[in-house]
Amino acid sequence: MPDSATLSAGCILASLVLYALFGGADFGGGVWDLLARNPGAADRRRLIASAIGPVWETNHIWLIVAIVILFTAFPGAFAVVCTALFVPLTIVLAGIVLRGAAFAFHAYRLHEERGAGRWGAVFASASLVTPVFLGVVFGAISSGRIRATEPLAFTGDVTLWLSPFPVVVGFLTLASFTFLAAVYLIHETDDPGLREKFRRDSFRSAAALVFLSGLTLALAAVDAPEFFRALTGGTWSIPLLAAEIAAAAGAIASLALRRYPLARACAAAQVSLLLIGWGIAQYPYLVRPDITVSSASASPRTLRLLLGALAAGAVLLFPAIFLLLRVFKWEAISGTPRRP
Amino acid sequence: MTELDLARAQMAMLFAFHILFAVAGMGMPVLMVIAERAHLRTRHPVYAELARRWAKGTAVLFAVGAVTGTVLSFELGLLWPRFMAFAGGVIGLPFALEGFAFFTEAIFLGIYLYGWDRVSPRLHLASGVLVAIGGILSGIFVVTANAWMNSPAGFTLADGRPVDVSPLAAMLNPASATETIHMTLAAFAASGFAVAGIHAFLLLRDRENLFHRKAVEIALAVGCAAAVLQPLSGDMSARFVARNQPVKLAAMEGQFETEDGAPLRIGGIPDVASRTTRYAIEVPKGLSLLAHHDPDARVQGLAAFPRDEWPDPVPVHLAFQAMVAGGTAMALLSVAAAWLFWKKREGLFGRRFLIAVALCGPVGLLCVEAGWGVTEMGRQPWAIRGIMRTAEAVTPVGGLLLPFAFFSLLYLGLGAASVWLLRREVGASPFFPAGSRAADPHGTEGKE
């Protein structure tokens, strides 16, 4: 049984995986909104808005859960991350505000005007920028550049994140979110033309994702060597890489065969494995190389209560999320049309 | 402005903006659920239309509240990393619980907004009820964290760090009860009056429209119930502050010297240089009576505390006076509403009363801002009272003017857009004729 600090870190990772799979895909939807070109752009945008509409706020909360666990269980680490990564985090926040508010306004106007309009453009551009800087944050905390021997003693440069590895992780995050969205969106419609368009987009973004995964690995070797060694040197490294490749191949093959529910599952597995691999390689560090899960953890009583609250909350939460998905996403997930 | 001032200004701006949407997120779902319940009971379409329109308003306000709330949860660390490094492990728990309340709100708001034709009427109404409960609990959890800053508990200070931490004791700190009750009532009063004010304004131009009449009735019922209870909660809060944070009370009341049988000052401007509050109407022994329920009780003045632990009494006193004045006006209007309603249902729709309701529309929200100002400015110079000064909590990152300016402009735009969109939505009011019994769900409307 892992200790409570490790369990708390595991909960952060789990929240981040859920955020990527659900919230990430909503950002990806915004990117496809941005990239939509005529003919048929309006139809695609409408489909994206209706797919995101009922669920995006719920999906967004996984990020808040991750951040709350971080500052409750590892307050010193939160302080260092917020100080060293002040700039990218501020940009992420601006993106979150612009994306969310613009989407709400945009969805609001759709009832009367049918069309994207100004808010649509803001929503789409914010959807493009936010994942990149979110990814930069994750790249930066694994890069080994943020030094803080004392949780409160970070006095380094606030531009440490401007380096090849964090930046490529940013684009990898963007590619993951866009890929997920394209694959998910195929089954949000029964219009064959739209489905084919999103299928083509899925291939395009899968190619970008595979390319950026390789580039990230290569840049890690030079720009984040310790993280690279942890990522490639573990006994779990080869099996994880194999699973990752299998998921990617499975996603592409099932897209080729138009087996969309399977493609969804493979795409979700692929992105989850990316994050899980990052998490295992990062462990036991929260911020490489100075802040670990045990050095930054809050008191044992806080951790126990937090884990208890998370477990109790999950018991209430998961049936509610299941209901939400059952009501709005059943056809898309299972591939069976709704019975009237 | 120093970097500390900029950090404080940014945080204040972010909070002042967010709190309006947070308050709406607590109050609006209740209105929307009451309207839907009335529709299920009476089958009158006017209630269904009200529930739908209020749900749309709730949707936009909740969305803006959700994203601006996210900003705050990060800005706690971005602007105040030392505060969070200290406090995270102590007071993080209510934020985690708030996360689940927020999930409940978001999930069931999704079902409510997009599920009119997809789920059964009972599940739909139940979803609305869960949105309301989630909203209220979210507010309560967050306010316990603020209460902790006023009344830190649940840890022992050792070598500048919290040890022997008890997150439950921190969450249930002595100030939690009074602060959460006061804030929850404020949210209902403010949203009830704001909504009633808007519909009363529209009713003045469209006197026969049942849509606005029913809206005024429901919103006033919620707003007035909260507004008449609020003075009781205010009395509890003031007496708690008198015991727990006497220096804050002194600043709120403009009380410079320690005094037995201290007077209550209505209005007035504290003058720090001469240590007097000028131009106030003084009610003899009033403050002692209110703060300690004893006309001769001793009230500590600012002078009883070291000068570097004073909050600035000028804004604290003025904000406090504004809050009390607004709260009193709302409570009086509520009593008048109850009287008019009791005499004759039609009484609520007299021209003069509608004007009063319309004028009171923004008062609740202004009171929320003023009250928030009192509790935050009144706690200065501390971030955590007696433990950590605000100046010690601030980030070492420089150049804070840029994010302050950026977020100010962004929020200005957001606020303008929200108002414009909601105005458009409310302005397109559907017409339901009043006067005919068939059109009136209760058959009690008279003719005008």
Image (spheres, coloured by chain):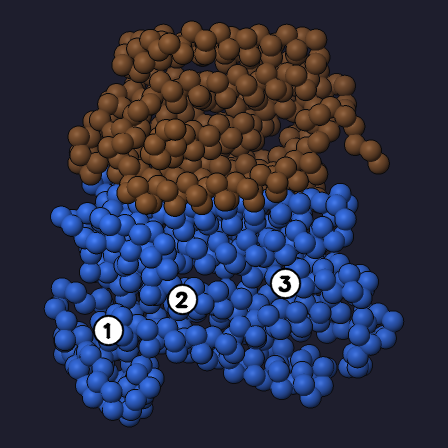
Chain colours: A brown, B blue
Residue at the location (72% across, 82% down)? B346
Residue A259 position (above or below residue B332): above
Mark 1 or mark 3: whose residue is earlier in sequence: 3
The residue beneath circle 3 is B31
Q: Dividing the image into 4 quarters, which one contains the N terminus of chain A?
A: top left
Considering depth in this image, is A14 or A2 the residue closer to the camera?
A: A2
Residue B172 appears in the rendering: yes
Q: Mark 1 lies on which chain?
A: B
The residue beneath circle 2 is B177
Count of labels in the image: 3
Residue at the location (43% across, 55% down)? B141
> Do the residues at discs 3 and 2 belong to one chain?
yes
**Element at badge 1?**
helix
The residue beneath circle 1 is B246
Q: Left or right: A287 with respect to B222?
A: left
Residue at the location (58% across, 39% down)? A318
